[in-house]
Image (cartoon, rainbow, N blue to C red):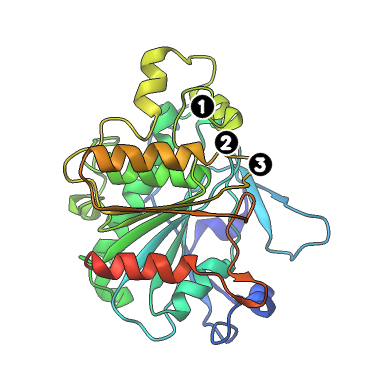
Amino acid sequence: MDMDLTRRTLIAGSALAATLPLGAAAAAPIERFPIWPGSPPGGEGLSVRDETVRRSVNGPADDIAWPHVATPMLNVVPATQPNGGAILYVPGGGYARVAVGREGSGIARAFAARGFTVFELLYRLPRDGWAAGPDVSLQDAQRAMRLIRAGAGKWRIDPARVAAMGFSAGGHLTARLASRAALRTYDPVDAADAQSARPIVAGLFFPVITMADPVAHAASKRELLGSDASPARIARFSAENDLPADMPPTLVAHAADDPVVSPGNSLAMFAALQAARIPSELHIFEKGGHGLPLKEAGRDHPWPALFERFARNHGM
């Protein structure tokens, strides 16, 4: 196990500085800590170890992904000038890995430069055999939201102003966090678990949503559901189904030319949000592939400002 995952650490975020928006390059160090006091729930009899891989041979040292996660963590990227708002950032990886580093991503730094304290989540994966199965990642997302609110005083945030945004498979997890915040996925372990897990606003970016063919992202479906892809299981883990009346206002964004996750996922989610009369907004950009950049043709891409605007319109 990576020994720095067993204690709180402060590490500089210099590796990504050259790629960040103006104002973010001089960002403060970040804090990292495990989200569970001791072993996470449902790991009895498992021998999971934290493992990382480089995402590209010539990329920055912190451009890593985790194919196995034993110690779920939060990276705390502090706001440059705090406005009291906070964002839980849920990265993707197709439920086969979690694409997040240790030093704070460019997206997290960009939102920190906008005044938000950003909490990046390293979550466990169903593939490792945890007792909760496909709900294991949701356990970690719920726990993370509760810890953020419980530590609001420490981080100088308003516990009523905590949003969540997820990317790719992280969009699926964020959609489930937003719609299943009240689902009891684990027994409380401390006082933090008395806090609400519901984000005030959700942002879903090029998200995996449905488990139903032909729109489903096959790799995420395989990793999440395994060999049991029964109709009932597909319906339960399709994030567009059974949206509750208290689903948070939700913004959905996708690139029309995404070759990995069909934009049909975002269309299905937006249709479900509208049918449930949830305040919602949809943006389909012409280009972007599987991802929306911070910069396009030398200018700021509009999606961060669109999400900030939407979030502020709904209580952030």
Residue at the farthest front position: 286
Q: Mark 3 — residue?
A: 259
Mark 3 or mark 2, which is nearer to you? 3
Residue found 30% across the figure and 46% down from its top: 178
The quarter of the displayed image where residue 283 is located: bottom left
Quarter of the C terminus within the rendering: bottom left
Sooner in the amino-acid sequence: mark 3 or mark 2:
2
Residue found 49% across the figure and 23% down from its top: 225
Residue found 23% across the figure and 72% down from its top: 158
Q: Residues within 10 Å of mark 1 (few under 14, many from 20)?
A: some
Q: Mark 2 — residue?
A: 48
Residues at marks 3 and 2, CA–CA distance in whole angstroms: 32 Å
Q: Nearer the viewer, residue 234 or 59?
A: 234
Q: Secondary structure at mark 1?
A: loop
| Picture coordinates of residue 196, whole percent (x, y) | 20, 52
| Picture coordinates of residue 269, whole percent (x, y) | 38, 40
Q: Residues within 10 Å of mark 3 (few under 14, many from 20)?
A: few
Q: Secondary structure at mark 2?
A: loop
